[in-house]
Image (cartoon, helix red, strand yellow):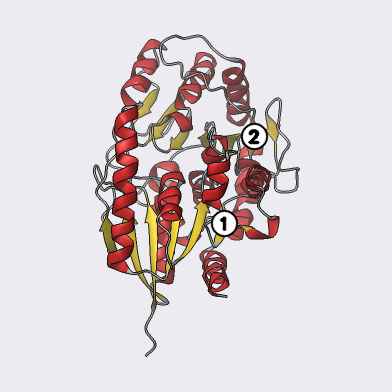
Amino acid sequence: MKNKKKLVIFIGGLNFGGMERVAFIMADLLKDDYDITIATLYQSNADYTLEHKTYNLDVSPKEGKINKILIAVKRLMATKKMKAVLKPDYVFSFGMYSNYMNALSKKNEKIIMGIRSYDWLTNPFTTSTIDKKIIAKFNSINSVSKLISADAEKYWGINKNDVRVIYNPYEVNLIRKKSLEEVDDFPFDEKAFYYISMGRLSHQKAYYHLIKAFSLVAQRHDNVRLVIMGNGEHKERLQELIALLKIEDKAFLIGGKLNPYKYVRRGQVYVVSSLTEGFPNALVEAMCVGIPVLSTDCNSGPREILAPNTDIHSKCEKFELAEYGVLVPEVTDVRDFVNSDMNACDRKMAEGMEYLYLHEGARNRYVELIQKRVLDFDYDSFKDCIKKELEKVEV
């Protein structure tokens, strides 16, 4: 039997997150074709326990400019050591930091860059000569959305034929099955109307905007509730904002969940409030569960998912009834946890949220439409695309 080629899937850590989920699915789908190891920059505060082989560089992030420089040097040395030990044929990296380390440590292995978030393209170094030279080291580049690909070509001067779009994969039937499990650790009120969201409690997800928008809806409708699943550095500040807005009896932060789908199923509307995304996994997963969705029209992914026949560069100025869900204007980067002032974007998000609350017919129509849309993101398509990427770099 021919020896399998060695594939390292290189990510940041083992925390709950869309990027990590995609990496683990890739490992599962390719395990019969490649000898796979999942390499991580660190594994502290891990949410996941993996069955796959792992290699931990064990260099956790630290605050402070000097520490960040030292961490970068340590991570580069550790990445070089990882490659020397594992001797991979391919290293497929996800995330800005892992991508940098992958490129700077390159020797004879083939390296593939995965851009799974728009954040990298807003990095101040994106258009620098240094960054472009680092990007040039990759044998192949793939992104998770058409908008990311288009902007990567613009910022880095890459030939558009060298950047391919590979949408994230979803096991629709399994998600639906898991959503049917009972919830026994949160008291959902059958008479209440629930907005649901899930993701890391980080700046990117802009949950302070969602909480403020929800508070506006709650002022007009007493039976609405908000449930946010996830862990992260903003948890205490978000809880303080909930208290400031006096909605502790209506807005709940319930932590990360191994099976979030059963909680999503108990909601009436799923909401994405992010500043940026790559291709928002949780949005598609909510569609798989079968509830209507509302998302900020952020870079990138939501418009491609919910309004695939529109211009990827267009932006809504008020809430938009898109083909497969509701889009609301982008939110501002205000990081405001300490007062009850509302931004225009909070009010516009609230308008979209209230529309779905008031219009059951629209909710039912979206439920029907999204059942077909989610089939565009199945496992088989993803596996074929990834295998073609790996075969391509062999040439």
Residue 39 position, x and y percent, is 33, 57
Residue 28 position, x and y percent, is 39, 66
Q: How crowded is mark 1: few (under 14 residues within 10 Å), some or many (20 or more)?
A: many
Res. 25 image quadrant: bottom left
Which is nearer the eye, 72 or 308? Answer: 72
Is residue 185 shown left or right of residue 316? left
Res. 263 image quadrant: top left
Residue under label 1, please give it.
142
Query: Identity of the amino acid at label 1?
Result: Asn
Q: In the image, what residue occupies the spot 50% across and 46% down?
A: 286
Residue 83 position, x and y percent, is 33, 63
Which is nearer the eye, 18 or 365? Answer: 18
Q: Which quadrant of the figure contains the C terminus?
A: bottom right
Residue under label 2, please give it.
327
Q: In the image, what residue occupies the spot 54% across and 69% down?
A: 380
Is residue 213 shown left or right of residue 24? right
Q: In the image, what residue occupies the spot 72% across and 39% down?
A: 313
Asked whether the beta carbons under mark 1 and mark 2 sit within 8 Å of each other, the answer is no
Query: Identity of the amino acid at label 2?
Result: Leu
Residue projecting furthest to the bottom: 1
What's the distance in space between the residues labelled 1 and 2, CA to CA?
26 Å
Give the structural element (helix, strand or loop) at label 1: strand
Is residue 253 shown left or right of residue 112? left
Which is nearer the eye, 324 or 162? Answer: 162
Is residue 23 shown left or right of residue 384? left
Q: How crowded is mark 2: few (under 14 residues within 10 Å), some or many (20 or more)?
A: many
Vertical placement of 158 versus 6: above or below? Answer: above
Say if residue 213 shows up in the picture.
yes
Say if residue 22 shows up in the picture.
no
Vertical placement of 363 versus 215: above or below? Answer: below
